[in-house]
Amino acid sequence: MKEHAIFLCVRIGLIASLLLGCSSDNAMHTLKEKLTQLKSRPSGQIDPLPTITPYSSISYTGSSLRSPFQLNAEQESNTSVARPSNTNSPNLNRTKTDLEQMALENLTMVGSIQFFDEKQPSALIDDGRGKVHKVTVNDYLGQDFGKVANITEDSVLIEETVQDELGNWIKRPRQLKLSVNQE
């Protein structure tokens, strides 16, 4: 406890000597002289604000001209640009099923079943929402006009109809494999 009191007294003494050193008359006098010099300097000249020219609008007159993103008549006749083909186009007026509302990535094949009187097996598809759907050949699933082409006991082959970069409808094969849970 006594050491603590001594340490406190030494600390107070150091702080007091620092405060006395900061308040020396010589330093204050030098500071006042410097401020007087700064105040006595001539003030600078501020440049006037630049003049701003008033805004004048320009009306666009090119709206009646050909779009720069389309070919003109001469360019069209000289190039062989592929026109969109509708030979593979899907039936857009067909009523979609529940499985066509979901992305193919969200669907999982969980089994297959074939009854005695059926020629082809049916696939059991889990929609990821707790419901299992029975799918047969020529049924549709997925958001890209996917049509079931073939069903085996461990996979479903799907033929999707999508547009390429030119707007042509093309067929794209996809496959759902049987999902085996290892529990």
Image: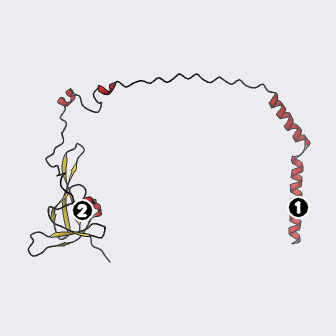
Residue occupied by mark 1: 10
Residue 164 coordinates in the image, percent (x, y): 23, 46
Neighbour tally class for label 2: few under 14, some 14-19, many 20 plus, Cα within 10 Å: many
Q: Where is 30 relative to 95, above or below? A: above
Task: Report the Cα–Cα distance between label 1 and label 2.
Answer: 85 Å
Dot 1: element: helix
Residue depicted at 68% across the width and 25% down the height: 46
- Which mark is first along the chain, 2 or 1? 1
Res 85 quadrant in image: top left
> Residue furthest toward the right?
25
- The residue sitting at 19% across, 57% down in the picture is 95
Residue 1 visible in this rendered orientation of the protein = yes
**Which quadrant of the figure has residue 155?**
bottom left
Disc 1 residue crowd, few under 14, some 14–19, many 20+, Cα 10 Å: few
Q: Is residue 178 visible?
A: no
Residue at label 2?
A: 99
Q: Is residue 149 above or below residue 180?
A: above
Give yes or no for contact between labels 1 and 2 (Cβ–Cβ under 8 Å). Answer: no
Q: Quadrant of the N terminus?
A: bottom right
Which amino acid does the dot numbered 2 rest on?
A: Leu
User: Which quadrant: the C terminus?
Assistant: bottom left
**Secondary element at image label 2:** helix
